[in-house]
Image (cartoon, rainbow, N blue to C red):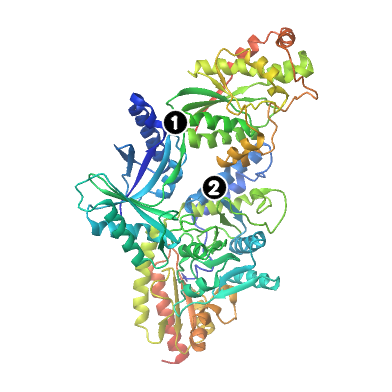
């Protein structure tokens, strides 16, 4: 039996003339992701549905479903079987294709969509006859038109008939790449991968920048961040991952600046470096995992001080979220278990005992001016290591 | 000539497994949990191994927990699921033909106050699905059924178990002991509605002392051993990298569908020849896993035949090797007569088995009839 994937795109329908550009981008994303996980598919578009057909007959559809669940820009999709355009084929395929699934549940209904009006049966007739056939063959089943366990859908289209069970919810959002490219500041914690995932969901392609401070931070810690980026990449597609050596700068701040301002100065310098890398790599904004008031460096005052060094937009998608809301998403995207592995990261190495929670820009700038960081920043930017993470 | 036809008991190590083991012994002896580079290197090998095994079961790497083998995997699954599910109910269900590592786990659960039902089979060893359907209720928390019976090779309808649980509104976890099926039948636990699946390395030409338990994402089981957090704390203990790497080597060489087709042809020819030997009856059903052929030799005691064959360097089992000296509970459950059970042999193949070996076995049983029955 031949199977296909029917993809319904989400918000794309709203986007007027840009729609076909977005749709093409979505097709390209789906194609690339399926190619990496399953194999080659060919695509046709018809009536706001993208039909993906595998070139290899033995394609692993389980895997394809798992892959599609993680592609942004898909509202819902179905895994469907193709039947001939005659009723015998329709009822045989429906029973063969969905029989196993229907035997596991108690109730069902049939829903028919007939876009080819030349087909000799009307939609209600198709529903009735397919329903009767399934009832005859699966004794444990009964009909419930209001709240069925499974809705069997028969779509009679121009060339073929598609038959499928319940629709599978997609990841929603916009196709990655449709909104541009941003650089995500990623630590080893819970928040930054979630922030990256949220912005990818809105169609942004991701670069990631991580600050390492060897020997204070371990190679394990960097591997952990690499793993987290790779989890986000399951949704966002390939991420350009940059690792900055931050040791010299951290040691200098520790030595020369007031202890209670350590974190805030560190974050400003991170921001400066990130902007340099982001601009060079064609990113239009930075993304951070900051959530208001979560820690001393994420108070209103502290954020104002870090923002002051940035001449590009800084997106903070988690700014209004509680920790438990962030954790819920982290678990959903499969990052939580990795995020809580216990390694030092560069944000925790030199953390002051009593950080200033209401710093003023004047105070910070004065403290910073004691040191000329510009050459160190140049060195850090130049020493950055890059890799692709899939 | 030697004919090793006891591959369901264990198998020789394939070259790839040996190579991976030596590599791990020489180069990756660090502790995968250590923070330093030696540890990181070992951890990378561990990750690679996990990912290879996960591909063979069509699941994610974090759904694989390495164990010490089939027995531990089965114990962990059965006890783990029963103890974790206790709040939801007290009933657990298995079959009469399970491997002792499942059966004895259920006997212990019975001693601990669980309500245990053992489902029987028909005369060809197929699970009695009506009895299962009748036994499952809302308080049932575990259904454990083997994928392939180790003595006769009967394939069980493991992909129907979840449907039974759902129909009866049972929260039951489905566990499948797939030790005899892994590498021999295409397995896709997620697609088949299976929550827990046990596999082992040494039945597929990997080393002994290692196996894996598939645990579907989100499935809660209570660990049997407690320790230092390895294997997500479900199975703590420093990972034995040589064994795990050897397991990876063996798994990476599997060609499930291709081997199944070849062995089916080989088995069909073998059974055909056996039917021409007077006094031989085949106990394995026609639709059994072709890697296992159970037969009875009329009038002969299996132990005598086993000794005689062993002198000829032909190695087979009487019943299951794990149950030496006991009357086979599987053949009993299938309703075989005592003299048929007493005279039963299990011939078990691997993808390396040749027609010559099987012919030599037939020569062996002809000789047994001649020497012992004076025919």
Dot 2 surroundings within 10 Å: few (below 14), some, or many (20 or more)? some
Which image quadrant is residue A10 in? top left
Circles 1, 2 touching at the beta carbon (< 8 Å): no
Q: Nearer the viewer, residue A187 or A117?
A: A117
Q: How many marks?
A: 2
Determine whether the residue tagged by mark 1 lies in a helix, strand or loop. Answer: loop
Dot 1 surroundings within 10 Å: few (below 14), some, or many (20 or more)? many
* Residue linked to disc 2: B61
Position of residue A92 measured from the top left corner of the image (x, y, whole percent):
29, 60
Position of residue A69 measured from the top left corner of the image (x, y, whole percent):
46, 42
Position of residue B78 measured from the top left corner of the image (x, y, whole percent):
62, 64
Residue found at the very far right of the displayed protein: A353
**What label sits on residue A218 in the rendered view?**
none
Indicate left or right for B135 with A111 as reference: right
Determine whether the residue tagged by mark 2 lies in a helix, strand or loop. Answer: helix
Q: Nearer the viewer, residue B83 or A144?
A: A144
x 60%, y 33%: residue: A225
Q: Nearer the viewer, mark 1 or mark 2?
A: 1
Which image quadrant is residue B256 in? bottom left
Q: Point out the image quarter for the C terminus of chain B.
A: bottom left
Distance between the alpha carbons at the discs numbered 1 and 2: 29 Å
Query: Is residue B375 at all visible to an observer of this figure?
Result: yes
Q: Point out the image quarter for the N terminus of chain B.
A: bottom left
Subunit of label 2? B
* Residue linked to disc 1: A174
Residue B79 vs A169, above or below: the answer is below
Position of residue A250 measured from the top left corner of the image (x, y, whole percent):
70, 19
Q: Nearer the viewer, residue B39 or A52?
A: A52
x 44%, y 88%: residue: B298
């Amino acid at each position: 039996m031949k199977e296909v994937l029917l993809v319904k795109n989400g918000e794309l329908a709203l986007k007027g003339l840009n729609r076909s550009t977005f749709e093409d981008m979505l097709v390209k994303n789906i194609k690339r992701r399926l190619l990496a996980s399953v194999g080659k598919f060919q695509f046709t578009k018809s009536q706001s549905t993208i039909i993906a057909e595998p070139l290899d007959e033995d394609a692993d559809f389980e895997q394809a479903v798992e892959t599609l669940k993680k592609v942004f820009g898909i509202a819902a999709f179905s895994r469907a079987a193709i039947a001939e355009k005659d009723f015998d084929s329709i009822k045989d395929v429906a029973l063969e294709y969905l029989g196993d699934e229907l035997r596991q549940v108690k109730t069902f209904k049939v829903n028919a969509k007939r876009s080819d009006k030349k087909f000799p049966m009307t939609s209600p007739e198709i529903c009735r006859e397919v329903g009767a056939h399934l009832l005859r063959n699966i004794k444990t089943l009964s009909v419930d038109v209001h709240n069925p366990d499974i809705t069997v859908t028969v779509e009679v289209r121009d060339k073929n008939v598609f038959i499928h069970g319940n629709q599978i919810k997609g990841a929603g959002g916009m196709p990655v790449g449709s909104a541009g490219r941003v650089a995500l500041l990623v630590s080893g914690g819970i928040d930054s991968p979630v922030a990256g995932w949220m912005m990818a969901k809105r169609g942004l392609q991701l670069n990631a920048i991580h600050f390492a401070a060897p020997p204070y931070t371990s190679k394990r810690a960097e591997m952990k961040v690499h793993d987290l980026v790779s989890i986000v990449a399951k949704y966002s597609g390939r991420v350009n991952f940059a690792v900055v050596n931050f040791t010299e700068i951290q040691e200098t701040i520790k030595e020369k600046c007031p202890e209670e301002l350590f974190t805030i100065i560190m974050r400003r310098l991170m921001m400066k470096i990130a902007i340099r890398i982001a601009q060079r790599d064609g990113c239009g904004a930075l993304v951070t995992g900051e959530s208001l008031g979560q820690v001393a460096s994420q108070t209103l005052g502290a954020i104002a001080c870090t923002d002051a060094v940035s001449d590009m937009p800084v997106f903070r998608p988690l700014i209004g979220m509680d920790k438990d809301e962030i954790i819920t998403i982290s678990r959903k995207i499969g990052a939580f278990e990795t995020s809580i592995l216990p390694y030092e990261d560069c944000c925790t190495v030199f953390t002051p005992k009593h950080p200033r929670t209401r710093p003023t820009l004047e105070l910070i700038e004065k403290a910073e001016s004691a040191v000329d960081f510009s050459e160190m920043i140049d060195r850090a930017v130049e020493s950055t290591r890059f890799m692709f993470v899939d | 000539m030697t004919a090793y036809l006891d591959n369901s008991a264990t198998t020789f190590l394939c070259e790839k497994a040996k190579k991976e083991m030596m590599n791990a012994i020489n180069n990756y002896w660090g502790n995968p949990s250590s923070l330093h580079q030696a540890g990181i290197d070992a951890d990378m090998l561990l990750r690679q191994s996990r990912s290879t095994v996960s591909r063979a079961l069509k699941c994610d790497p974090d759904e694989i927990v390495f164990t010490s083998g089939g027995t531990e995997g089965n114990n962990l699954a059965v006890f783990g699921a029963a103890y974790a599910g206790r709040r939801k109910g007290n009933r657990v269900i298995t079959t009469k033909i399970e491997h002792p590592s499942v059966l004895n786990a259920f006997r212990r659960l019975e001693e601990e106050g669980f309500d245990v039902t053992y489902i029987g089979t028909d005369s060809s060893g197929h699970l009695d699905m009506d009895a299962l359907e009748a036994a499952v209720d809302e308080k049932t928390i575990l259904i454990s059924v083997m994928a392939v019976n180790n003595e006769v090779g009967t394939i069980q309808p493991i992909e129907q178990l979840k449907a039974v649980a759902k129909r009866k509104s049972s929260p039951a976890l489905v566990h499948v002991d797939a030790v005899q099926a892994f590498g021999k039948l295409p397995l896709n636990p997620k697609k088949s509605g299976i929550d827990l699946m046990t596999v082992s390395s040494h039945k597929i030409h990997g080393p002994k002392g290692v196996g894996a338990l598939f645990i579907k994402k989100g499935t809660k089981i209570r660990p049997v051993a407690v320790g230092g957090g390895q294997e997500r704390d479900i199975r703590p203990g420093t990972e034995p990298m040589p064994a795990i790497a050897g397991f990876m080597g063996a798994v990476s060489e599997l060609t499930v569908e291709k081997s199944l087709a070849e062995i089916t042809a080989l088995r069909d020819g073998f059974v055909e020849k056996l039917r021409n030997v007077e006094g031989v009856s085949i106990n394995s059903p026609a639709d059994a896993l072709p890697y296992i052929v159970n037969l009875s030799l009329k009038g002969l005691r299996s132990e005598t035949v086993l000794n005689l064959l062993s002198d000829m360097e032909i190695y087979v089992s009487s019943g299951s090797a794990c149950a030496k000296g006991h009357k086979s509970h599987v053949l009993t459950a299938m309703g075989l007569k005592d003299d048929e059970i007493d005279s039963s042999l299990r011939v078990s193949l691997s993808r390396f088995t040749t027609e010559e070996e099987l012919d030599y076995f037939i020569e062996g049983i002809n000789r047994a009839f001649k020497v012992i029955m004076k025919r």
